[in-house]
């Protein structure tokens, strides 16, 4: 009963964080920040707290787990939790109307639970049965709910208003929560947390070495990945993503070349001598042998005078691979 209350407390804390974020929006000042992240000051403070917690507790435990637990055992534990997660995937595929995918997920659970010995071996994948990735946050997105503001949850990390309510739904429908044995349930939840953090060790190493601003790196990667998951890998084109935060597209008229006024030579002055062809200039390279002996001085001069046109720099897209379910 205590373990179940702790799980409910975590869910209520997540919902409370969303409420605080929404109420705090009235005091948030506008600026040139990312419009997807209107509560950035608060989110950065929680991100800093999570980072300190990770360095002090979560990361050392995950590193010890990887160092002392054999690879085969860690793989089996990961498969076990993945098999449990397939139950939630099947439920969300059903809610989204993807009945063939839901049948596929239930087939994976049946095969891995029996032939894979409670899921410790992923026999379904070995047989070519694909694994899907769905959660209640994606289901809400499929139903038309937008992401809402980006928020950072204590301990749990990056999320959005929609995904936070989806996370609460995942907690209440998780098979782990239904286990009556309190010690077993809490142990499995803790082991699941350590397993996920161990899978993220490489990603955190990239974050520490490659990201100029780790907070922005995590935010952009999370929002990009969640958008991709909601639309099953084929998100619609969003022109707003190509704009800088808070900027609007500018429609500048094309500049027309101004015509130079004709200058007539003054009486008694010598007219300006005509420009000699390039081939007649002493010391100039002779290009008449190229292109079959027919050269064009004007074409050569155009190529020499033309400056390279600088186009808009391509927008860098950050992609990192994260474990299933956020």
Image (cartoon, rainbow, N blue to C red):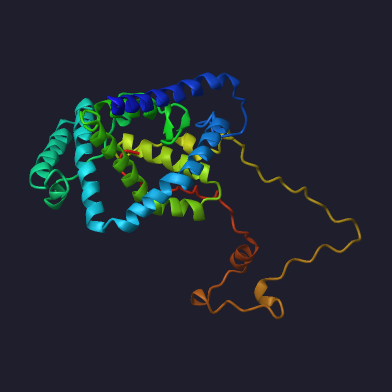
Residue 229, position as x, y percentages in the image: 32, 38
Q: In the displayed structure, would residue 91 be above or below residue 78?
A: above
Which quadrant of the rendered structure holds the C terminus? top left
Residue 74, position as x, y percentages in the image: 26, 52
Q: In this view, does 257 lie to the left or right of 112?
A: right
Residue 94, position as x, y percentages in the image: 19, 28
| Quadrant of residue 91 within the rendered picture | top left
The answer to whether residue 248 is seen in the rendering is no
Q: Is residue 240 left or right of residue 252?
A: left
Name the residue located 46 percent from the left edge and 25 percent from the top edge: 17
- In the displayed orientation, state which residue is furthest to the right: 268
Total marks drawn? 0
Name the residue located 86 percent from the left edge and 64 percent from the top edge: 270
Residue 284, position as x, y percentages in the image: 67, 78
Front residue of this view, candidates 301 and 203: 203
Q: In the displayed structure, would residue 10 be above or below residue 117?
A: above
Front residue of this view, candidates 44 and 253: 44
Front residue of this view, candidates 40 and 258: 40
Q: In this view, does 282 lie to the left or right of 167?
A: right
């Amino acid at each position: 009963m205590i373990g179940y209350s702790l799980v409910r407390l975590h869910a209520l804390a997540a919902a409370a964080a969303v409420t605080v974020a929404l109420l705090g929006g009235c005091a948030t000042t506008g600026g040139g920040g990312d419009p997807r992240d209107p509560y950035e000051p608060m989110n950065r403070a929680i991100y800093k707290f999570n980072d300190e917690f990770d360095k002090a507790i979560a990361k050392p435990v995950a590193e010890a787990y990887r160092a002392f637990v054999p690879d085969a055992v860690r793989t089996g534990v990961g498969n076990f939790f993945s098999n449990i997660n397939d139950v939630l995937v099947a439920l969300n595929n059903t809610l989204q109307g993807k009945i063939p995918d839901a049948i596929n997920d239930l087939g994976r659970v049946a095969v891995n639970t029996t032939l894979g010995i409670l899921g410790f071996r992923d026999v379904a994948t070995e047989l070519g049965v694909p694994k899907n990735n769905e959660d209640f946050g994606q289901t809400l997105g499929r139903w038309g709910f937008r992401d809402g503001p980006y928020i950072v949850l204590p301990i749990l990390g990056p999320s959005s208003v929609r995904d936070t309510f989806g996370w609460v739904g995942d907690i209440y429908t998780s098979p782990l929560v239904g286990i009556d044995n309190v010690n077993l349930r809490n142990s499995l939840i803790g082991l699941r947390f350590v397993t996920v953090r161990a899978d993220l060790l490489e990603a955190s190493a990239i974050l520490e070495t490659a990201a100029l601003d780790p907070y922005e790196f995590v935010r952009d990667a999370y929002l990009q990945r969640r958008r991709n998951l909601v639309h099953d890998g084929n998100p619609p084109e969003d022109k707003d993503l190509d704009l800088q935060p808070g900027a609007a597209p500018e429609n500048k008229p094309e500049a027309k070349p101004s015509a130079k006024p004709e200058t007539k030579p003054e009486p008694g002055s010598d007219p300006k001598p005509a420009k000699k062809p390039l081939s007649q200039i002493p010391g100039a390279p002779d290009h008449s042998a190229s292109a079959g002996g027919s050269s064009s001085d004007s074409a050569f001069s155009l190529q020499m005078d033309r400056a390279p046109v600088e186009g808009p720099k391509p927008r860098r897209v950050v992609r990192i691979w994260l474990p299933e379910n956020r």
